[in-house]
Image (tube, grey):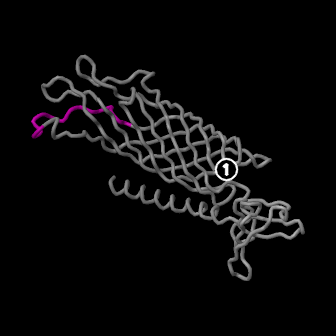
Amino acid sequence: MKEYVNSVFLFSLIALSVMLLPCTHSVQAQDLLVTTNRDSLNCKIGKLANDFYPIEFKVDNELMTGLIHKDSVMFFRKNLFRSIDDTRLRPWYPTVALGMNLGGGRQFSPQRVGLTEDFNPQMGSSSDRNQFYAGADLTSFLTSKTGYGIKYHFRSMLGGDIQQNYIGPMIYFRFWDDERKNHWIMQFSAGYGRMVHNNAMVKIGTKDPEPIKLIANSLAGDIAMGYNLKLSQHLSTQFKLSLTIGYPDHVKIFDYARINPGGANPLPDISGYCENMNSLNLSVGLGFH
């Protein structure tokens, strides 16, 4: 499992590096300037100072700088070209997007929440399966429809006693409307899931029941669909419905040597704790691009 976790973070780091590439293109993007003589220039235009715009452009592959009076400028459009050496138009679609969502979820199956009076496992009620959900995803789009990125979400139940974290690489599909303004969302991700159950009640030997901390790691997957509604050039609102699946293969008792020194007592019964991460989540949030 440790090797798997390291692999997930390695893939996430590589994906993050790839996603930062379009950001550099955005910084290098060039502007279109049209003069009152109807001459056009691919250049980088600075802020107006003392009635002059500073400009930077290339002539015969030589970088030049200069000033142009505001009265000589008919109009200009920022970041229209990909770079000073590339006169192709920049993509009409956002190339990097950050989504942040909040909402709630519902655990599919009951989770163990403690002990009964006769020290048997006690399963949670229906209300104990409700969750708080918070998620984020960062994506770099290679085309108008397809992007790759990283997805993370956090979920909690029982007032925070049960906490679940997920992180993994993601593929993101966008399906645009006819006006190319809003789009449907489809996201597929596989990665690392981690469950922590604080204050899990167990009975160790002849001692009274006591709370312990349990930790479980898992291969997990996340599928989401939703809708992105554009509010402005760099901001949108999102609605998402997601499904998370994960089955831990081992549940570890945190600090077991201190709880049961020397292994004097048999291993406590922890069956039913941290069994799975399976849930359905509904969230709303903002997209930045």
Residue at image point 25% right, 40% down: 254
Instruction: Locate residue 97 relative to residue 280 in the image: left or right.
Output: right
Measured from the top left, where is residue 10 in percent x and y? Answer: 42, 60
Instruction: Locate residue 249 relative to residue 54 in the image: left or right.
Output: left
Q: In front here: 15 or 234?
A: 234
Q: In front here: 158 or 87?
A: 87
Residue found at the very far right of the displayed protein: 37
Residue found at the very far front of the displayed protein: 50
Measured from the top left, where is residue 138 in percent x and y? Answer: 55, 51
Q: Is residue 284 magenta?
A: no
Residue at image point 85% right, 66% down: 35
- Per the image, the residue denoted by label 1 is 174
Where disc 1 sits, the SS reads: strand
Q: In front here: 225 or 26?
A: 26
> Counting other residues with Cα less than 10 Å from the Cα at mark 1, is it few (<14), some (14-19), or many (20 or more)?
many
Which amino acid type corresponds to the residue marked 1 in the rendered image? Arg
Q: Is residue 279 above or below residue 69?
A: above
Q: In front here: 69 or 113?
A: 69
Report the magenta residues as a range: 261-275
Residue at image point 57% right, 42% down: 224
Q: Which quadrant would residue 182 be assigned to in this image?
A: top right
Q: Is residue 264 magenta?
A: yes
Q: Is residue 206 above or below residue 53?
A: above
Residue at image point 79% right, 70% down: 41
Measured from the top left, where is residue 196 in percent x and y? Answer: 34, 37
Measured from the top left, where is residue 95 in percent x and y? Answer: 64, 57
Q: Magenta stretch: dominant SS?
A: loop
Q: Which quadrant would residue 100 be assigned to in this image?
A: top right
Instruction: Locate residue 213 relative to residue 42 in the image: left or right.
Output: left
